[in-house]
Image: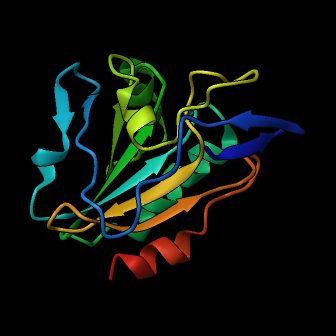
Amino acid sequence: MSSIIYNGYQLKLSGELPEIGSDAPPFKLTHGDLTSATLNDYTGKKVILNIFHTLDTPLCSDSDHRFNNLFINRKDVVVLVVSADLPFAQRHLCVVDDIHNVIPLSMMKNKQFGEDYGVLITSGPLEGLLARSIVLIDEKGKVAYTQLVPDLGNEPDYLSALDAAK
């Protein structure tokens, strides 16, 4: 079982990120219009899961912007921004911030995503939210890259994710 740091607190996670080379766990998440999204919806494309606790922090919003800009011209890659935010809030923040190249998804209806990917926070003040992490899934549904950010106050390594998606 992994753990991360948040404001000096050690937070336990539900497990470990999926192993590189393994089949990506299937998921069912929620779009802003309350329809479902599954991993199968993106078959044939590389999928970057940009996972974090909430869009309503400057660092998470910045992460959203960075991925939006890094993959602006990549038709072979889809970036899914996954958080525990309500889908309405995600949609609102993306409209306000002019974000169009990433797809915000909520685990509102299904915390199984966090458990299956090993990133559900299971202790401390952020229990029930998601740890900041990145998972790249290749076109065949295999995990190709993972990154767990050890401190929620830090940004992920965007360039490593970009390199892995080449």
28 relative to 7 in the view: left or right: left
Picture layout, residue 90 above or below residue 50: above
Task: Please tell me which residue is depicted at 41% across the width and 23% down the height of the picture.
Answer: 111
Percent coordinates x, y for residue 1 in the rendering: 61, 43
Is 53 placed above or below 70 here? above
86 displayed left or right of 37: right
Quadrant of res 29? top left
Of the pair 78 and 13, the residue shown nearer to us: 13
Residue 149 against residue 108 in the figure, above or below: below
Q: Residue at x 81, y 38 (%)?
A: 10
On the image, the x and y values in percent for residue 81 come to 41, 44
Residue beneath the point at 19% across and 46% down: 39
Which coloring applies here?
rainbow
Q: Horizontal and vertical percent for residue 41?
A: 11, 45
Q: How many marks?
A: 0
Image location (x, y in percent) of residue 165: 34, 76
Q: Is residue 95 above or below residue 137?
A: above
